[in-house]
Image (spheres, rainbow, N blue to C red):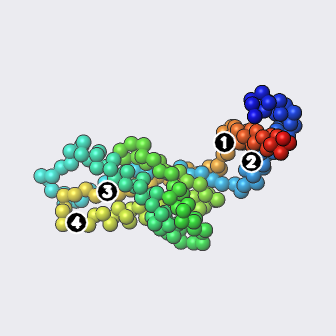
Amino acid sequence: MELKEFIAKLKKYHFMFFLIVASTVGIVVLFLLLQPVRYTTVLSLHVGRVHNETQAEEYHYDDFYRLQADERFADTLVRWLASPSIVADIYSGIGRSVVMPAEYELPKIFSAKRLSSQYIEVRYTTATEKIAQDLATSLEKVLNERTANLNIDESKKNITWFRVVVEKPITYPYHIPWTRVLLGALAVGIVFGLWGVGIRTHFES
């Protein structure tokens, strides 16, 4: 079918086209409005050091290598928060009844990003503010336990160990990005509308 013919058919079935577009947008909006209230939490993580009191005087970290080590450890923390086993441990550490996400969802629970050598921003969404707080507490415990497991050579008294410092979480109701949602729904509706007109035209011929 040539473009001119399709445009003519689109004009002929314009009511069906706009009905499909409007229905698609309406279904998306209704679906989002019926969703339960959710909460977004922003958590700040800092890479710190536990200084050994018996640190040898002849050994010192050069500032450059220290920052490089902090940066690598921060990257490790980001990868840990994408590990299903570690995320599962964080949920298990809440210590009360909570729905464990499916295994395929675990790597997506925490969105972690290293913003500097020693600073990581973590975002996650929960059903209640209480769960958000419990997850933050459990996250700090699990990450520091994993970090402690890295300190296996206690004979080296001149080593400065890592530790994870977690700030108080900031939790607020999740805001739906309506502009992006409506534009996306409109684009999908237009595609569906064109398909509908094309199918109608096909059976008409």
Q: What residue did someone put label 2 on?
A: 28
Q: Position of residue 16 (x, y in %)?
A: 85, 40
Q: Residue furthest front?
A: 205
Q: Is residue 194 above or below residue 37?
A: above
Q: Which residue is mark 3?
A: 162
Is label 1 in contact with label 3 (beta carbons under 8 Å)? Answer: no
**Disc 1: CA contacts within 10 A as few (<14), some (14-19) or many (>=20):** few
Residue at the top extreme of this rendering = 4
Q: Kindly check if marks 4 and 1 are in contact, taking CB atoms under 8 A apart as contact.
A: no
Amino acid type, callout 2: Val
Residue 34: image x %, image y %? 76, 54
Give the mark nearest the N terminus, 1 or 3: 3
Give the residue number, with chain letter if any, for mark 1.
177
The N terminus - image quarter: top right
Q: Secondary structure at mark 4?
A: loop
Q: Nearer the viewer, mark 2 or mark 3?
A: 2
The local crowd at label 3, few if under 14, some if 14 to 19, many if 20 or more residues have their Cα within 10 Å, is some
The amino acid type of the residue labelled 4 equals Asp
Q: CA distance from mark 2 to mark 3?
A: 46 Å
Q: Which residue is mark 4?
A: 153
Viewer-proximal residue among 71 and 12 = 12
Gap in angstroms between the C-alphas marked 4 and 1: 49 Å
Q: Amino acid at mark 1?
A: Pro
Q: Residues within 10 Å of mark 2 (few under 14, many from 20)?
A: some
Which tag is nearer the camera, tag 2 or tag 4?
2
Which badge, 4 or 1, comes first in the chain's sequence? 4
Quadrant in which residue 194 is drawn: top right
